[in-house]
Amino acid sequence: MTNRYYNVDQNEKYVAQKYISKPLLIENLKFDLRLYILLAGCDPLRIFVFEDGLVRLCTEKYEAPTKSNVQD
């Protein structure tokens, strides 16, 4: 795991993600939308998007993280 581009080994496979501190909400419910792509080249740029994705919807109303609920 790394958060610096210069630590990335070009011969390895990686998953990239970013945590959003102020998430978008649907009726005060948090959701997760995942799109899967393959970055096949940078010069020229070649990207393939997988036809299927993933959506998850929470069933409890979102509360901003605090010390008491951070594990929820």
Image: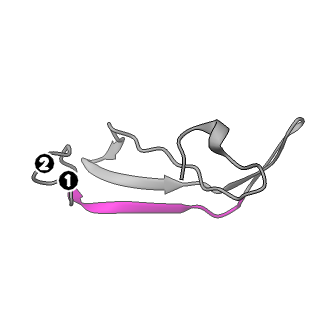
In what element is the residue under mark 2? Answer: loop
In what element is the residue under mark 1? Answer: loop
Q: Residues within 10 Å of mark 1 (few under 14, many from 20)?
A: few
Residue drawn at the location 72% of the way across and 57% of the way down: 12
**Residue 1 forms part of the magenta stretch:** no
The x and y percentages for residue 47 are 79, 47
Image check: 28 left or right of 41?
left
The quarter of the displayed image where residue 6 is located = top right
Q: Nearer the viewer, residue 12 or 29?
A: 12
The quarter of the displayed image where residue 20 is located = top left
Residue drawn at the location 52% of the way across and 49% of the way down: 17
Give the overall secondary structure of the magenta segment.
Answer: strand
Image check: 16 left or right of 38?
left
Residue drawn at the location 63% of the way across and 38% of the way down: 5
Q: Is residue 71 above or below residue 65?
A: below
| Circle 1: residue type | Val
**Residue 59 forms part of the magenta stretch:** yes
The x and y percentages for residue 14 are 65, 56
Q: Are the two marked residues, 2 and 1, in contact with CB atoms closer than 8 angstroms?
A: yes
Q: Which mark is residue 70?
A: 1
Q: Which residue is mark 2?
A: 67
Q: Is residue 2 above or below residue 59?
A: above
Of the 4 image quadrants, the one containing the C terminus is: bottom left
Residue range in magenta is 50-61
Q: Residues within 10 Å of mark 2 (few under 14, many from 20)?
A: few
Separation of residues labelled 2 and 1 (CA atoms):
6 Å
The x and y percentages for residue 69 are 14, 54
Q: Nearer the viewer, residue 15 or 20?
A: 15
| Circle 2: residue type | Lys
